[in-house]
Image: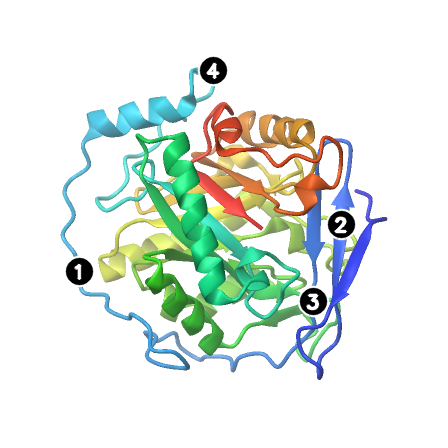
Amino acid sequence: MNFKNISKNIMIAAAVAMLATACSQNSSTTKVTTKSPEKKAAPESKKAEPAKKSGDTVVTSTTPVTYPPIDHARYDALMKKLANGDSTKWPVKNAPYPLPGAILPYKRIVAFYGNTSSKGMGILGELPPNEMLAKLKGEVKNWEKADPTTPVQPALHYICVVASGVPGKAGKYRTRMPFNRIDTVIAMAKKANAIVFLDVQVGLGSIRTELPELERFLILPQVHFGMDPEFSMKDGSHPGKKIGTYDADDVNYVSGYLADLVKKHNLPPKILIVHRFTKKMVTNYKNIKLRKEVQIVMDMDGWGEPSLKNDSYRYFIHDEPVQFTGFKLFYKNDLKKAPHHMLTPQEVLNRKPSPIYIQYQ
């Protein structure tokens, strides 16, 4: 992996260090790597409790909702549609039917990604909130037009633990966003009838440490989770110096934790996004366990020209099937190289299988 290209530094606040954005590239794919300044982390919680109020007033109700049972014939038909004519690996064999209330494959998720404290980490923080939500609404309409048979669910995908260029007090090279900022994103999402993904870049930390810290939010039915192997530095390297990794065992830990929350709080299935754009980012994919309480999306999030993105999707998503698939689009970085073209919704839908989760950065 080559880290020669370094983009402009970003200042999140005057009192904190600069945010460096490193770009990674190899012959198979390219991807923006972002690092955040270390800021004062949110207080460590001894025991996860339901979110109450730590900033904006947010929806905290976990009152059980009764959902209709899964129609197996309809579910199978929708999964076959997503396979898009490719029966070699898709739909994934022996996958369990989800619990009632599942979002996938009934809706396609269109998410805006980033951090509200940084204009350089994605569209979520690049624009003022109302302007950003209006743009998200426009993208939802574009996807509805491209595939009128699949309703679109808007989403905000918020990086709530950010890989950092400095060790910080914990020495983990990661920054936890304060809980009131997560509250703000959840409140913002409510305005757009959007769901929320909380994304974690663990740095030199551990997914087993970071995930429980977010339980107070994950017990909300509209809040889901994302894990980014790129910044899981198990060999002790600093984030941005090389590409990190997760194993199937890590994914299984997360899905098991989420499944326990679903059962304990009588929630609809959680969605777990796993980012990927190289082979080593996710090892032993065949050992990833599928559960009726959790829907796993392998998200191809490399940036580059259309041919590069398509190759990455084929090699790392299509050829190593897990359950559902995602595709990431970059408003700026996908335009850097000829033909300077960001794939359209219809072009993305032509992939085999068709992605059911779309992310814009």
Nearer the camera: disc 1 or disc 2:
2
Q: Residue at x 64, y 31 (%)?
A: 312
Q: In this image, 6 relative to 70: left or right?
A: right
* Disc 1, SS: loop
Tag 3: amino acid: Ser
Q: Which residue is mark 1?
A: 64
Instruction: Tell me how far mark 3 sits from mark 1, CA to CA.
Output: 38 Å
For residue 218, what is the image quadrant?
Answer: bottom left
For residue 310, what is the image quadrant?
Answer: top right
Tag 2: amino acid: Cys
For residue 1, what is the image quadrant?
Answer: top right
- Residue nearer the viewer, 287 or 238: 238
Q: Which residue is mark 2?
A: 23
Residue 253 visible within the image: no
Q: Earlier in the sequence, mark 1 or mark 4?
A: 1
Tag 4: amino acid: Thr
* Rendered view: 323 above or below 171: above
Asked if the residue under mark 3 is in contact with the one under mark 2, i.e. CB atoms within 8 Å, the reply is no
Tag 1: amino acid: Pro
Instruction: Tell me how far mark 2 sits from mark 3, CA to CA.
Output: 15 Å
Q: Earlier in the sequence, mark 3 or mark 1?
A: 1
Instruction: Tell me how far mark 1 sits from mark 4, CA to CA.
Output: 39 Å
Q: Earlier in the sequence, mark 2 or mark 3?
A: 2
Instruction: Tell me how far mark 2 sits from mark 4, CA to CA.
Output: 34 Å
